[in-house]
Structure formats: structure tokens, C-alpha cells
Amino acid sequence: MNSFRRNVPLLAISQALMMSGASLIITTAALVGFELAENRSWATLPLAAQFIGTMFTTIPAALLMERIGRKQGFMLACIFGISGGVIATMGIIQGEFWLFTFGTLLVGIFNGFGNYYRFAAADAVDKEYKSRAVSYIMAGGVVAAFVGPNLANLTRDLIETAPFAASFSALVGIYLVSFMVLAFLKLPPKPITEAISVGNTGRPLMVIAAQPMFIVALVCGMLGYGVMVLAMTATPLAMHHFAYPFAQTSFVVQWHILGMFAPAFFTGGLIKRYGVLNIMLAGGILGVACVAVNLAGSSVAHFWTALLFLGISWNFLFIGATTLLTETYSPEERAKTQALNDFIVFSTVALSSLSAGALQNSYGWQMVNLGLIPLLVVILASIIWGKSRRDTATMS
């Protein structure tokens, strides 16, 4: 419990800072890319580069932090974030699309480490506190709903000749503060067990990955995140297409991010009361509701409602999948299992982000949403299958 009280608040603050930077990029990167790219189908490449950086960092980050400790890994990552903020700002000022994209790639490397905040919290507390710890870390993102989009809106025109350059320079300050907060962490350098012998890495990865609950966690984490990113990334471009001012786009994204993280204050409690698979099922249904609202109209109210549903859907699916995943491995299997999960999840996220610009530019907002339906069907089917397998195991 002492570890819970000390580390979870610090990790929640770190999560809030990371997501504030990410939400600023989500709100602005596609619009900056739209202006800088020669081919506007590549408008979402800078945002996709952030997720690509995260994808390629997940496995090295897990292995490195297993060796040097998570605190040291998190602090090292801040250097990449600071560098990314500086380079992205230079890219905007100089009008260089590829320089801007490289800056967001470096921010993605920072995020690749930062995505282990939730696992750091879960692994540092007793089993009964795991879902609550993950929820509290994710709840740190509530701050991001207000900081990121509003910071982007307030700083957009501070450098008149380079819209959003000042917004990206603000990232440098965010990552500097992250570095200072992380310095106060006191995490165990190795998994919490004294029974792990040197060189013992547990079961083969294929055995772990073949477990029904691992499959459900991976499918829902992967496709739930992919659905969210595809719709979220295309939204600023869609609202720009419908000639809505940036302030309204910022408002919609702000409420979307609030939907992503505000439920985390009680998602852990809901999981404990109703079961992780039931909460994940609710998340899948909310994803369907998002698509239905988007297909019904394109007013600001439609965008707002749909993106709010989308945020809550992601929250239930991602926290649920993270909680479910922690049930599938032993302490000595932690690093490789988490690394495999996050590599696949963020590979899907990168592909979704990159696809959003091309789909929106070539086919329009309706087709973006129709493309989400098969993914949501797979999510719902996997949860129902998982519930049947768990019920069968309980009866036997």
C-alpha cells in the first residue's frame, strides 16, 4: 500500500504530462501536415510517425528497462521527447514536412517508454490493487483533455508566420517537467518476487500467447486502440473539410480525450464489480454507437457526441485489456509478454493513423466510419468468445 500511495500519484502525473503532449499533437499534427505536405494524402504521416516511433520502441524499451530499471528508462525517454519538441518546432518554422515528421517520431519514442507507466503501477502493487492502479494512471490523462487542446488553441498564432510552431515548442517544457517528476519515483528494479532465478524467463512466448485470455486482451487492445486512432485522427481533417473553425475542432478533441480518461476514476471499480469482460463488452458497444452517430450527420453536435462515445469505448477496452493481460503472465514473463502486446498494439495504431489521412482525403468521412464496422465486429466476437471460455473453465 505504501508503494501505491507513493508511486501511483507520480506515475499518474507523468501519464498526464505525456498525454497532454500527445493530445496537443493529436489536435494539431494532421492540420500542420495538411499545410506542409505536397501530397495531402500524407497529412497524417506526422501523427502516424509518432505511433511508428512508439511501435518500434516498445520491445527495446521493455528489455532495456528490465535491465536498467523502469525509472532510469523513463527518465532517458524524456531526452527523446525534448529533442522531438525542438525538431518539430524547427520543422514548422522552416516549412519542412520531413523535419516536422522526424520530430514527432522522436516524441513517439518517448511515448514508447511512457506507455509502460500503467504496467509499472500494476507490477508495483499487490494483486487486489492492480486494476485500481491502472485506472488511476489512465485517469492522469484527464488533465490532458484540458491542457493539450487548449494549449494548442492558445499558442497557435504566437509565431505569426508559423502557425502551431509555438504549440510544439511548449512540448519541450512538458517533457522537462516529466523528467523532474520521474526523479522522485521509487520503483523496484526487478519484478516483485524473490523466487526468480537468474536466467529464468518462464514459459515460451508462444505458450503465453496461446492462452484464450491473452488473445482476447490482445485483440481488444489492438483493435480498440486502432478504431479509436483511425476515427480520432481523421476528425480534425473532416471538420476542416466541413469548414469548422479550429476552436470547435479543439473543443471536440478535448471532450474526446476527456471521454478517454475521465471514466478511469471508476473503471477499475466497475471491473471489480461486474467483471473485466463485461466492461470490455460495454466498450465495444459504445464503439458501435460512435459509428452510428457519425453516420447520422456531420454537425458539431454529431462530432462531439461520437467522439465522446469513442473515448469512453477506448477507456473500457484498453483498461480492460491491460487488466486482463496482467492475468496471463508470471513476474519472470512480464517483460516479453508486455513487449509483444504493445508492439502489436502500436503496429496497429501506426497503421490506423497512417490510413486515416488517405481514407479521409480519398473517400471521405462516411467511408472512414464504415471501415470501422468490421473491426468492431471482431472486438465484440472476441469478447463473447472469451466469456464462453471463461465460463467453461469455471464450470470445470
Image: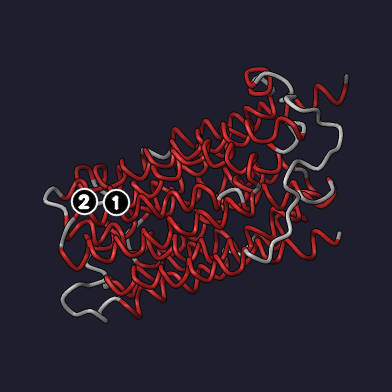
Labelled disc at residue 102: 1
Q: Amino acid at mark 2?
A: Trp
Helix or strand or loop: what does disc 1 sit on?
A: helix
Please provide percent x and percent y for residue 178.
Answer: 54, 66
Q: Nearer the viewer, residue 65 or 33?
A: 65
How far from the left and from the top, in percent, is residue 333? 71, 30
Tags 1 and 2 in contact by the CB under 8 Å rule? yes
In this picture, residue 378 sits left or right of residue 273: left
Q: CA distance from mark 1 to mark 2?
A: 6 Å
Three-letter residue code for mark 1: Phe
Residue 372: quadrant of the picture: top left
In the image shown, does 114 or 369 lie closer to the viewer?
114
Q: Position of residue 249 (x, y in %)?
A: 34, 68
Q: Is residue 357 left or right of residue 211?
A: left
Q: Which mark is residue 132?
A: none
Determine the residue positioned at 81% across, 43% down. 192
The picture quadrant where one finds residue 312 is bottom right
Residue visible at 49% across and 73% down in the picture = 146
Q: Quadrant of the C terminus?
A: top right
Tell whether 289 sits left or right of 149: right
Give the residue at x 53% y 35%: 59
Look at the picture and state if 145 lies above or below 37: below
Question: For mark 2, does the 10 Å Cα neighbourhood hold few (<14), some (14 to 19), or many (20 or more) residues?
Answer: some
Q: Could you tell me which quadrant the N terminus lies in?
A: bottom right
> Which residue shows up at 47% across the image and 53% down it?
110
Q: Which disc number belongs to residue 98?
A: 2
Quick one: label 1, few (<14), some, or many (20+) residues within 10 Å? some
Nearest the viewer among 302 and 52 is 52
